[in-house]
């Protein structure tokens, strides 16, 4: 990721320093358990723990020659440890280090993302409570449908992001596995208790069957969850973009003093944050497909997955971390225009109450087919001639005969549509 979209706390997880530090801890923990088993001298472990270190520039220089990152790392560590370094990596293979480290990094990244989601959920909930009763028009096919509240829109976003939090928790659990099983995963040269010890110390669980790598269905689930979360962010972003259109203007991204919207048109205030989130979502979703393609490796292992994961691990998590933080600020500072919502609600001169009239007619004994015809013929006059829906109904003898004037007027009541808002909020927020 480029610095523009990178938060240092997430970037640090994927820096070489963190990666090699995890590698060293994996190797050292394995040595500790090997010493308990009598495979290597206890004195050697003490030296490895005290002297173990590495030099990133030196690792890069060695790798340029040997063309193998783990060998380059072990060589650098050996230069610090001395003769006792011969006991490091006993019975292990490169994937034991690489895959276990990658799991640790993805768990670390998931913890950052879960913290981000908590912030987003808190912000959405606060705005939902603020606008629980702020009435606006609900739309289907982008056409005015029936009344809702802006709080209900926010409650829908909250419920979806809460589901995403549960998905990410499950994906975190799924990816929190380690493997110290040696070549082709048979533990031929290393005891399984070493794997158990290393995993426990790192907060992981042993992979039941690791062949020579951790099965990539776990990774596919992880990156697919990130893609789903990104898609949810885009759903919110697109709604905000639609609601900020000049002819709608029910909400607007905060426009700070001194901010400029266009290099050509000084009047512009554009929804750039929401548009950015749409772009970020496209980018993050693109990582789901290669993650799924990585599931199918040859036999016990190949490295066709390796280069892909070196990209998508950092890029997907860094991009989603940035996006969640951006969404959080967008929601907290979102400008809401209740008067414009009221204006738009009344734009279609009462058509939004057509279903209530339809149902009233059926309750009065008119067939559904005839009721629909009666309502629609009056509704079309509003569309085509700019008439007022209630006035047209009151002038329609058949409708008045079936319902009476008072019942028709009663059916144009906003509260009828909003009577269960409290119920929905209790379902969503559980309080």
Image: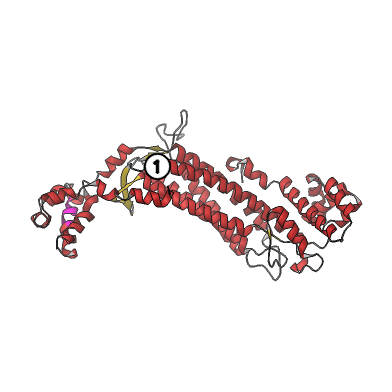
Q: Is residue 148 visible?
A: yes
Q: Is residue 76 above or below residue 206?
A: above
Rendered location of residue 241, percent (x, y): 41, 44
Number of numbered discs overlaid on the protein picture: 1
Q: Residue furthest top?
A: 258
Q: For the stretch drawn in magenta, what is the main secondary structure?
A: helix
In x, y percent, where is residue 296?
Answer: 63, 68
Q: Is residue 205 above or below residue 332?
A: below
Q: Is residue 413 left or right of residue 178?
A: left
In the rendered image, the residue lying farthest to the bottom is 299
393 falls in the magenta region: no
Name of the residue lying farthest toward the right: 83
Asked whether residue 377 is drawn in magenta, I would say yes
Looking at the picture, how far across and down is residue 414, in whole percent? 25, 46
Element at badge 1? helix
Q: Magenta region: which residues?
A: 375-381
- Point 59% across, 51% down: residue: 316
Q: Is residue 287 visible?
A: no
**Residue on which the image places disc 1:** 129
In the picture as drawn, the residue positioned furthest to the front comes out as 431
Residue 33 rendering spot, x and y as whole percentages: 81, 58
Q: Residues within 10 Å of mark 1 (few under 14, many from 20)?
A: some
Identify the residue at horizontal 60%, vertical 41% (top origin): 7
Query: Does residue 163 appear to the left or right of 383 in the view shown?
Result: right
Q: Quadrant of residue 70?
A: bottom right
Residue appearing at x 70%, y 71% in the figure: 299
Q: Nearer the viewer, residue 119 or 140?
A: 119
Q: Residue at x 68, y 69 (%)?
A: 298
């Amino acid at each position: 990721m480029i610095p523009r979209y990178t938060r240092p706390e997430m970037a640090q997880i994927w820096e070489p320093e963190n990666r090699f530090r995890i590698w060293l801890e994996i190797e050292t923990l394995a040595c500790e358990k090997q010493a308990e088993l009598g495979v290597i001298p206890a004195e050697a472990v003490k030296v490895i723990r005290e002297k173990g270190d590495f030099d990133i520039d030196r690792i890069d220089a060695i790798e340029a020659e040997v063309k193998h990152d783990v060998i380059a790392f072990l060589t650098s560590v050996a230069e610090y440890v001395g003769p006792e370094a011969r006991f490091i990596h006993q019975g292990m293979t490169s994937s034991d280090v690489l895959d276990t480290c990658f799991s640790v990094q993805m768990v670390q990244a998931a913890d950052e993302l879960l913290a981000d989601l908590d912030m987003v959920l808190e912000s959405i909930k606060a705005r939902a409570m603020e606008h629980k009763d702020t009435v606006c028009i609900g739309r289907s096919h982008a056409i005015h449908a029936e009344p809702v509240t802006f709080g209900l829109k926010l409650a829908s976003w909250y419920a979806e992001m809460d589901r995403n939090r549960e998905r990410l928790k499950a994906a975190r659990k799924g990816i929190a596995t380690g493997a110290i099983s040696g070549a082709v995963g048979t533990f031929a040269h290393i005891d399984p208790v070493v794997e158990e010890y290393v995993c426990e110390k790192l907060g992981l669980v042993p992979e039941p069957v690791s062949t020579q790598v951790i099965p990539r269905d776990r990774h596919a689930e992880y990156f697919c969850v990130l893609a789903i979360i990104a898609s949810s962010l885009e759903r919110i972003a697109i709604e905000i973009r639609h609601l900020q259109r000049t002819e709608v203007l029910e909400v607007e991204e905060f426009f700070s003093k001194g901010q400029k919207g266009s290099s050509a048109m000084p009047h512009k205030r554009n929804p750039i944050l929401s548009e950015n989130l749409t772009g970020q979502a496209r980018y993050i979703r693109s990582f789901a497909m290669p993650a799924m393609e990585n599931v199918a490796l040859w036999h016990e292992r190949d490295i066709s997955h390796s280069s892909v994961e070196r990209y998508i691990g950092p890029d997907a998590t860094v991009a989603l971390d940035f996006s969640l933080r951006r969404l959080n600020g967008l929601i907290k500072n979102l400008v809401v225009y209740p008067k414009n919502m009221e204006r738009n609600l009344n734009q279609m001169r009462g058509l939004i109450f057509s279903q209530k009239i339809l149902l009233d007619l059926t309750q009065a004994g008119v067939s559904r087919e005839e009721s629909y015809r009666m309502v629609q013929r009056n509704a079309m006059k509003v569309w085509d001639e700019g008439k007022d829906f209630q006035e047209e109904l009151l002038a329609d003898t058949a409708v008045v005969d079936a319902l009476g004037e008072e019942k028709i007027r009663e059916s144009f009541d906003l509260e009828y549509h909003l009577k269960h808002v409290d119920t929905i909020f209790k379902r969503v927020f559980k309080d």
